[in-house]
Image (tube, grey):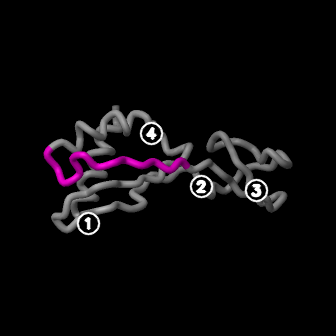
Amino acid sequence: MHELSIVTGVVEICEQHAGARRVLAVNLVIGALSGVVPEALEFCFEAATKDTLLEGAKLGIERVAATGFCAACGKVSVIEGFIDPCPRCGGFPLEMRSGAEMRVKDLEVE
């Protein structure tokens, strides 16, 4: 389960930016094609934050749909995979616009 190592990284990032203050909430952005399972992150969060500045913090997850730009028709469309053709015209390849990201959006501190 690589989500545990991801949550550990999130804890490190938040502690670096919290300025030794207790973190009350952390919000993540996770793309549909990031390879990260949000439910697994939620499952690991409590264990990974024990005895840290994030212990007891609320975890928020914003899910981002995957979108791609088609040069053939000039449209941005929601896609299901990295190698999907354009759902409007069948054009290929699409330029990924969103959906692969995984980042800390913000955090709330005391």
The x and y percentages for residue 30 are 48, 48
Amino acid residing under circle 4:
Pro
**What are the residue bounds of the magenta stretch?**
51-63
SS for callout 3: strand
Position of residue 80 relative to residue 67, above or below, is above
Left or right: 88, with 4 as reference point: right
Q: CA distance from mark 3 to mark 1?
A: 38 Å
Residue 17, labelled with which disc?
Answer: 1
Tell me the mark number nearer the camera, choosing from 2 and 3: 2
Residue occupying the point 42% across, 52% down: 28
Specify which label sits upstream in the sequence, 4 or 3.
Answer: 4
Residue occupying the point 37% across, 39% down: 41
Total marks in image: 4
Residue 70, labelled with which disc?
Answer: 3
Residue to which mark 2 is pinned = 98
Residue occupying the point 59% across, 55% down: 98
Name the foreground residue: 16 vs 55.
Answer: 55
